[in-house]
Image (spheres, rainbow, N blue to C red):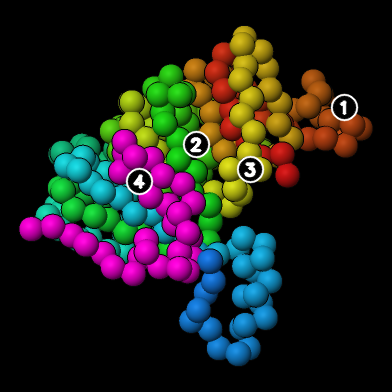
């Protein structure tokens, strides 16, 4: 028994974007969308020139347990089992609550076996993060989680509740813990993201530009000045503040 998928990786219209051999991950993109009518051809031509194209993740399970964002699965090949990861009624309530407060679906399917998974096409960019590079834990902004292997998922509260509400932030973010790999689905490519490493220092960001950060950092939402009058006079309002030692990945454009 075995699996051989033809006309995928050997397709002239397919290019490998990035790979993580140890985790069994291959990210591909379609160079052109060939299923078009005449009216869509011009838009597609210029989109392909700007690297706007469909991307897909191919995962070789290798008997590992993968957690996938709900609705992201397209194809399963081979001996693959699907579960929910729900261990009890209390665990179901915790996952449901976690999904409600983070904006992510609380119950995410888990896939195990020795087959192949192909995830749904997306126009977003796939960012592969080895969580060992983050000291074994990472928190991400809402909507970025895509898939993970060898990691536990956990909700993390924002320290400043009033600031979060005023700043339009949620009260909780989704975090991952362990020595595995996490896939992020980002509207921006890796080339437009920078990582800032803090050593007992502070980072202030005017806007929701952070993608992910170390849970060791103290994350709050604060006014730019000590008073509301000062904030109004400066033309700035609330900023996201990260204090301590750790790293933050963010977009500058």
Q: How far apart are marks 3 and 2 (CA)?
A: 18 Å
Which dot, 3 or 1, sits closer to the camera?
Answer: 3
Q: Pick out the residue farthest to the bottom.
A: 38
Q: What residue is shown with label 4?
A: 25
Disc 1 crowd rating (10 Å Cα; few below 14, some 14-19, many 20+) is: some
> Would you place residue 70 above or below residue 240 in this image?
below
**Corner quadrant of residue 98:** top left
Sequence-first tag of 4 and 2: 4
**Is 132 covered by the magenta stretch?**
no
Q: Which of 117/233 is in front?
A: 117
Q: Give the range drawn in magenta.
A: 1-30
Q: What residue is shown with label 1?
A: 230
Sequence-first tag of 3 and 1: 3
Q: What residue is shown with label 3?
A: 191
> Would you place residue 43 above or below residue 244 in this image?
below
Q: Residue at x 81, y 23 (%)?
A: 225
Q: What residue is shown with label 2?
A: 140
Query: Residue 30, image x and y in percent?
Result: 49, 66
Mark 3 residue element: helix
Q: Do the residues labelled 1 and 2 touch (CB within 8 Å)?
A: no
Q: Which residue is drawn at 87% across and 27% down?
A: 230
């Amino acid at each position: 028994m075995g699996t051989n998928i033809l006309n995928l990786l050997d397709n002239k219209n397919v290019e490998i974007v990035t790979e993580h051999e140890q985790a069994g991950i291959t990210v591909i993109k379609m160079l052109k969308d060939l299923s078009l009518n005449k009216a869509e051809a011009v838009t597609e031509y210029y989109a392909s020139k700007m690297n706007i194209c469909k991307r897909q993740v191919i995962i070789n399970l290798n008997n590992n347990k993968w957690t996938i964002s709900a609705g992201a699965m397209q194809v399963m090949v081979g001996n693959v089992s699907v579960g929910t990861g729900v261990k009890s009624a209390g665990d179901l309530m915790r996952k449901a609550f976690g999904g409600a407060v983070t904006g992510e679906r609380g119950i995410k399917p888990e896939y195990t076996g020795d087959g192949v998974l192909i995830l749904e096409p997306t126009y977003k960019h796939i960012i592969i993060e080895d969580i060992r590079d983050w000291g074994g834990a990472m928190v991400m902004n809402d909507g970025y989680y895509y898939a993970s292997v060898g990691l536990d998922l956990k909700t993390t509260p924002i320290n400043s509740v009033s600031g979060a509400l005023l700043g339009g932030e949620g009260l909780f973010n989704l975090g991952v813990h362990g020595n595995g790999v996490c896939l992020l689905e980002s509207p921006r490519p890796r080339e437009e993201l920078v990582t800032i490493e803090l050593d007992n220092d502070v980072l202030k960001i005017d806007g929701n530009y952070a993608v992910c950060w170390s849970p060791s950092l103290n994350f709050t939402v604060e006014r730019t000045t000590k008073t509301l009058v000062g904030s109004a006079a400066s033309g700035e309002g609330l900023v996201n503040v990260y204090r301590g030692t750790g790293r933050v990945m963010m977009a500058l454009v």
